[in-house]
Amino acid sequence: MSRYQRLADRVRAALRTAIRRDRAAHELAPPPVVPDPVGAVRVGHGHGDAALDTQDPELVETPPDEEQSPYLHDDVMVSRGLRIAAAWSWRLLAVAVAVGAVLWLLAYVRLIVVPLIIALLLSALLEPAAAWLRRVGVPRSLASAIVLIGGLGAVVGILTAVIQAFIDGFPQLYDQVQQGIEQIRSWLKTGPLHLTQGQLDQAFASARDWLDTNSKSFTAGAVSTAKETASTVGEVLAGMFLVLFLTFFFMRDGRGVWNYLSSLFPREAQASVYGAGNASWRTLTSYVRATVLVAFIDAVGIGLAALVLDLPLWFPIAALVFLSSFVPIVGATVSGAVAVLVALVTHGPVEALIMLIAVIVVQQVEGHVLQPLLLGRAVALHPVAVIIAIGTGVVVAGIVGALIAVPTIAVLNTAFRYLYREPEIDADLRPG
């Protein structure tokens, strides 16, 4: 082989080696760097190393195709914070619309919903007595009827005693109010204000003129109230009948009714729904029993203070405290203010101050001892949630709405927590 032929073979071998190296370099090279529209930083580590993306992969947007319309990729031009705010905004708007629709529906059918909730509350209160009668051998229907009639008789008896005590004590209250007004007038003249008789007469004359000026509006309001009352009597009677009817059958067939309602759900959800109903019923029972006991203790404490101070209407005041205590926070404050006002107009500022101290002590014992001890964490609600629930109940159904708002929220809270946690349900708790 000649020298020129050997040189040609070496050149061909070098070219083949260069071609193989070039192919290997192209196979190991990283992909070309594409500018990221949202500011991602890509870092390479030399020839043959894969490029590393330092940005969250969820935040990297696919660059728009130059041949497509830019409007198909307008999200690329919107910041991440604005997209999150928009997503939260329309979801919150949807929730607000749903809540408003539910409240509107409840207000529209309140003549059915309110008696239903009251019947559930009464059933939770009276069911233990009916269950005891069934255990001793009394038939189910007869036990429910006995408990319902006995509870109705107790309510009528208490109301009769309160009304009779108010009628008996009203003359004494009127005389003491007159004496209290005279004492206030004397204090205005001889106290630090040193008002003259002419100034007092002018103030009373201004008040009398104001009443005369607004008497027509008061009269018109009274007439319209009378008309509304006439149309409301039928609704109240129908609601009372519905409450009694539902309470009787809830005590008689409550378990069967809930079994049937649970069976209407899909088979996979029946156990969870049934367990949530049981947990909610236990919460409602605990709430009603604890509220009745707390209301009784409040009524006894404030009633004894009124009796010691020799207030003329101490028994009606105690009854008012008992009834108003079913509205948490607000009811106790209003009934305590009434007791202090009666003490002020009948006995003077010293007795009113003593009455105020007694009311504060009773409310502090209720808020820091009775409520946590009796209710516990079963119906734990923040005071803000309680106030919002009471306000919503007043808007939807008036005073009755204020009474049933808190137990309704407590029951719903228990049901949602149960369904959210998805606890294990025993076989004997499953609907049969």
Image: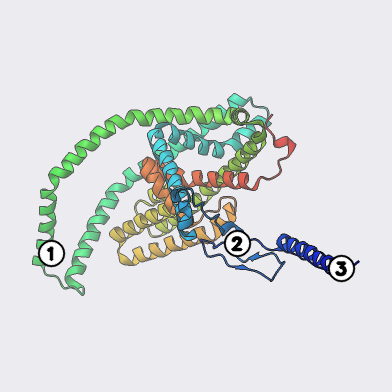
| SS of the residue under disc 1 | helix
Q: Amino acid at mark 3?
A: Arg
Name the residue rendered at 59%, 40% in the picture: 281
Residue corresponding to mark 2: 56
Q: Check the image and report above or below for 431 versus 35.
A: above
| SS of the residue under disc 2 | loop
Name the residue rendered at 51%, 51% in the picture: 65
Residue corresponding to mark 1: 200
Q: Residues within 10 Å of mark 2 (few under 14, many from 20)?
A: few
Residue corresponding to mark 3: 6
| SS of the residue under disc 3 | helix
Residue 54 location, quadrant: bottom right
Give the left or right position of residue 123, taking residue 70 as reference: right
Name the quadrant of the N terminus. bottom right
How far separated are the C-alphas under marks 1 and 3?
Answer: 136 Å
Residue 430 location, quadrant: top right
Q: Check the image and report above or below for 66 versus 253.
A: below
Q: Check the image and report above or below for 117 versus 182.
A: above
Name the residue rendered at 56%, 30% in the picture: 250
Q: Position of residue 388 (x, y in %)?
A: 42, 52
Residue closest to the eye, 327 or 295: 327
Mark 1 / mark 3, whichever is N-terminal:
3
Residue closest to the eye, 351 or 269: 269
Contact between marks 1 and 3 (CB within 8 A): the answer is no
How far separated are the C-alphas under marks 2 and 1?
Answer: 79 Å
Q: Which mark is residue 317?
A: none
Q: Amino acid at mark 2?
A: Asp
Q: Check the image and report above or below for 136 versus 90.
A: above
Give the left or right position of residue 385, taking residue 166 as reference: right
Residue 370 location, quadrant: bottom right
How far separated are the C-alphas under marks 3 and 2?
Answer: 58 Å
